[in-house]
Image: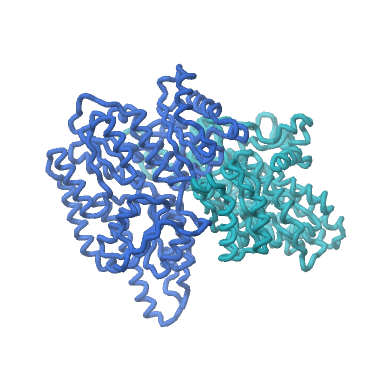
Amino acid sequence: MLQEKLQDVFNEPGCSTNQAKSEKERKKGCSKALKPGAAAGGCAYDGAMIALQPIADAAHLVHGPIACLGNSWDNRGTKSSGSQLYRTGFTTDMSELDIIHGGEKKLYKAIKEIVQQYDPPAVFVYQTCVPAMIGDDIEAVCKFAAKKLGKPVIPVMAPGFVGSKNLGNKLAGETLLDHVIGTVEPEVTTPTDICIVGEYNLAGELWLVKPLLDEIGIRILSCISGDGRYNEVAQAHRARLTMVVCSQALVNVGRKMQERWGIPYFEGSFYGVSDMSDTLRTMARMLVERGADKAIIDRTEGVIAREESRVWRRLEPYKPRFDGKRVLLFTGGVKSWSMVTALEGAGLTIVGTSTKKSTKEDKERIKKMKGEEFHQWDDLKPRDIYRMLRDSEADIMMSGGRSQFIALKAKVPWLDLNQERHTPYAGYDGIVNLCEEIDKTLSNPIWRQVRLAAPWDARPDAKPVGA
Amino acid sequence: MGNIQRFPHSAKAASTNPLKMSQPLGAALAFLGVDRCMPLFHGSQGCTAFGLVLLVRHFREAIPLQTTAMDQVSTILGGYENLEQAVRTIHERNAPALIGVATTGVTETKGEDMAGQYSLFRQRNPALAGLKLVFANTPDFSGGFEDGFSAAVTGIVEEVVQPSDKTVKGQINVLAGCHLSPGDVEELRDIIESFGLSPIFLPDLSLSMSGRQPDDFTATSLGGVTVEQIAAMGASEATLVIGEHMRVAAAALELKTDVRSLFFDRLTGLEASDRLVRTLSELSGRPVPAKLRRQRETLVDGMLDGHFFYSRKRIAVALEPDLLYAVTSFLADMGAEVIAAVSPTQTAVLEKLKAATVMVGDHSDVETLARDADLIVSNSHGRQGAARIGVPLHRMGLPMFDRLGAGLKVHVGYRGTRELLFEIGNLFLSREMDHDEHGHAHGHRHGDGHEHGQHCGSGSCGCSAG
């Protein structure tokens, strides 16, 4: 079962990387083989959890030993405007005896306890490596529990060892397609209902976008899965249009919704001024093509014109402050690119970016825009990043949390672009937030101080404080 | 104090808001206290990623941690190839002084024969004979953080320590349990050195995890006890064993070296600190230094000043077993009532706890047991539950991701005990002042919502406006 699912995901025709591959290559799967002793990053279970946990009113139960949840719960910044149940960590905490006797009974008991105590609209049950190895039939337990308890109990078949985080995202998407989307009918539908896929509302980012959509008259029928509610996700099949935010993660959902329910999808981004405007335009145009009132196009243009002029005006003060400042982007390559134009518009110079997760087309696009001499790294070792920063080849590094200490130990400003951050960067206001954060850290007086030599090895020409 | 209730296990099938962390993570922390070490998890890549993020969030330091990246095929067919490749790759890329391998749920469920894999590796890689390699069995599905820490330290002792004919005067070993923060280890070093003794700490987190500024990038741990120092532990005069969970490692050390062990179940509290200081004075043959005498005096003074605020306070404590023992004992010393002591795992030390209820459980159990408590002492994961029931939380243990300087907190010795006493005492004191304000506020809005936010940690403490 899982093998078939994996093949299916690997064959995803909506994936632009796959399109460039031969059939034989495609069969080998997306993820590069991990190198023992030199690998980093999360596993498939991690990826599945990232994609589904933002469904805030559901219970998320991890079936496995303590490591899978005990070490990882409560570490993501996805926000909910209502239910906080998603922040509760549930696990079967499998012990030696469960492994010998099998964990199915304990799993059923755990589901029952959660339903009785919290009465969530649904329970997601995450399969991890150990129960997969001992052959616990999670799907059967979920089916049985759903029938007995009268609630959707959804098996998420993404044990860690099947692959990377990214693969886990896709398997989570398959789970929604198989068990959730299409199971609930909305009370009301409108011609401007959309479904957003792959937006997790980190630091409340969706809330910087939603007011604009409200103003235009576009309704988010369902967001998969930021600030999500189970029933909204289950109604996604009645959307008129799907926007796939992070195509690397969940394009399979967009494509299959098109296949099954005839809902067209497009890939868009909320990061960066031009990308944001493009996204709004595409949304409005495609909705009109599907029969929505033409007036939304005018309203969209109105909002874009106002927001763009507002955002450039608000970025103006940063220009002189950012003059000559160089940024090193190091994020895996996906999100970073759409921010580049906005950052350059605010006066920053981007000296290079990682392209580890970028597609061929992405790389071409970068080359075309930035010229051949612009640095693109597929795989830059931490030691090399450290040297670059130490040698002042950049004034600030923007990356995910794991590499922050490379910058901080080199005494170079650093800004978090990934899931642990607390500031939203999406939409027009988000770009202003981002520039404010960059300015805040670049202009902090600590940088001069922390680079001073200690008094015991200060050279005679060292400048005194205030000089 | 009422009848002591002891129920060893929660009857629930679902652990809700776990307090427990897995064994390999504990092992990783122990390995990180060895200089130029690379801990390696023998399991799938997520096992490492989660552990890494947790330690990074707590210590705010780069954490070296690698994975054998087990996939479906190697999980079923056996992981030796992955292990060998991982060790060789790490050796080539980072040339560490020690590679500490911890198994995980994946490799333990498969039943990988680690002793066999160790000899096979040695056989097949004669060129790497000089590489120090420690294997620890740390299944995710049994025990917890403390057990993994203990297994790794025991493994290091067995692999690295050498017996010695001669004794180095004044050299003593300290087996430092995981309830000691890097700050605690630093404090302990100060105390021991003030008697003219030279301690070898295993592990020594004070040198690796307390915020280093390296001259160059390093992919392994930076600082900590060196492999050479560990090897020399056989020449010490005595071994101070700190914490119940260090007993196994202590036995291994004694068996190998004949160095006698002196056991300390805790170092927090006046009497506990007195015992340490007396022992060090005897070991060194020196009088107690003036600095420690002054520290003792101020601790006694602090206890007198602070006892008003501690007496009969109802406190729930949820921490790793040895830290749980140290903290509940200290609170009992101060006249507080520990109404509930919750441990993530079952261990012998729970028998000694002075608490009305002792339980192996999770944060949701704390939430139930602490409803009418005056304070909860637990890690940062306790903040959600504490906020829901409106009880202030004092953060201790690991992980502590919503506070700066988590690794540098000190709660051992006279000075550390005094700091803990003031920190918790101040919570009670400010609360009393606060409640006074409410009395005068005559039902108006909360006097100072901000103060309350501080108590409860997350801003919404449940003790809303009256």
Image quadrant holding the C terminus of chain A, namely top left
Question: As displayed, is residue B119 above or below residue B327?
Answer: above
Of B299 and A253, the residue lying toward us: A253
The chain assigned the colour blue in the figure is B
**Is residue A251 left or right of B21 when viewed as pictured?**
right
Q: In this figure, what is the number of numbered marks?
A: 0
Is B107 displayed left or right of B366 in the figure? right
Q: Residue A263's x, y, as percent? A: 82, 53
Q: Is residue A268 visible?
A: yes
Location of residue B255 (image quadrant): top left
Left or right for A332, reference A92 = right
Q: What colour scheme has been applied to the protein in the rendered image?
A: by chain
Q: Position of residue B112 (x, y in %)?
A: 51, 33
Residue at the bottom extreme of this rendering: B442
Image coordinates of residue A282 in percent, x first then y, are 79, 52
Q: Quadrant of residue A39?
A: top right
For the point 32% across and 67% down, which residue is it? B3
Residue B377 visible in the current orientation: no
Above or below, comparing residue A215 to residue B276 in the picture? below
Q: Residue at x 36, y 63 (%)?
A: B5
Indicate whether B378 appears above or below A405. below
* Chain shown in cyan: A
Front residue of B64 and A271: B64
Q: Quadrant of the N terminus of chain A?
A: top right
Instruction: Please name whichever residue, B384 or A247, is drawn nearer the observer in this view of the structure.
Output: B384
Residue A274, position as x, y percentages in the image? 72, 48
Quarter of the rendering containing residue A344: top right
Residue farthest front in this picture: A101
Is A176 or B107 nearer to us in this picture? B107
